[in-house]
Amino acid sequence: METHEKGFFTEENSVEVVTGRNANAQDPRLKQVIEVITRKLHEAVKEIEPTQDEWFKAIMYLTRTGHLCNEWRQEFILLSDVLGVSMLVDAINNRKPSGASESTVLGPFHVADAPELPMGANICLDQKGEDMVIHGRILDIEGRPIANAVLDVWQANDEGFYDVQQKGIQPDFNLRGVFRTGEDGRYWFRAVKPKFYPIPDDGTVGKLLKGLGRHPYRPAHLHFILKADGFETLTTHIFDPHDPYINSDAVFGVKESLLAEFKRIDDATRAHELEFPGWFWEVEYDFVLTSSKKG
Ligand code: BEZ
Ligand code: FE
């Protein structure tokens, strides 16, 4: 027996026997990852003490989760989302200095080739919903405007559906667009107030949420990806703080700093300027980007 071989497998020495077998791994990162996972997994199994039947149910759950994945649907990402793992990986990879805008999950509804639109455009293409204007600045950490920053926005409609979920019902590229800032770093566009919606809950993740007594809803939000030369790309949302699900987002994406006030404006002159027929919602929000890491 070689030194890294730890003898026959027993309940007590399970971790050492299994991880010892990986002593000749070529890739140190793979070796580290599998060692940690083996340790934590064996610890969980020892604490849970599953029956053979329960273990098989777990295997079948993951099998069904895999079978639900295709070009359009990624049930494993959804599972990672509802277990808080997506937000944890996001937090670890996006530690920001104080004053910088915080990140949150990307989600499955981003479309890469949304049209670039002139500042002020209305991204609502079907005139459905309550009018809203959103404006603010894209700044660096010193408060200076960032010119030529690209803001990619997408949101659900007033019934809680993205265009890609309602092909043939909503126009293509409804409630999405790409805007580029000028020298003043300002952005503005028109849209409609988004609504809360359930994450896809007709699969294994929905079944798990039901079993855990959890709802599948995300509070109303707008998604953004912000890019500018010399700055870290920021993937984030802004949320309606008065949404009924603001404290129980199914995927844990809400952060205090991402709450924006949705103000109801009754001002006929401003409505006229914005080409809205009557009262509307106004949201003002500044984004602060951090410089790219050097080296
Ligand atoms: C979303 O906000 O689009 C989303 C995020 C995570 C899971 C499902 C949807
Ligand atoms: Fe969303």
Image (cartoon, grey):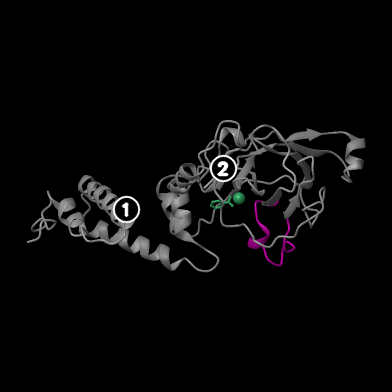
Check the image and report above or below for 146 versus 121. above
Residue 173 location, quadrant: bottom right
Residue type at numbered disc 2: Ser
Residue type at numbered disc 1: Val
Q: Residue furthest front?
A: 295
- Distance, label 1 to label 2, CA atoms, is 25 Å
Q: x%, y% of residue 198?
A: 56, 51
Q: Residue at x 89, y 37 (%)?
A: 270
Which portion, as a residue range, is magenta?
A: 157-175
Chain-order first, disc 1 or disc 2: 1
What quarter of the picture does the N terminus occupy? bottom left
- The reply to whether residue 206 is in sight is no
Q: x%, y% of residue 273?
A: 91, 41
Q: Is 229 displayed left or right of 4 in the figure?
A: right
Q: Which mark is residue 103?
A: 2
Q: Nearer the viewer, residue 37 or 182?
A: 182
- The secondary structure that dominates the magenta segment is loop
Alpha-carbon neighbours of circle 1 within 10 Å: few (<14), some, or many (≥20)?
Answer: few
Q: x%, y% of residue 51?
A: 21, 55
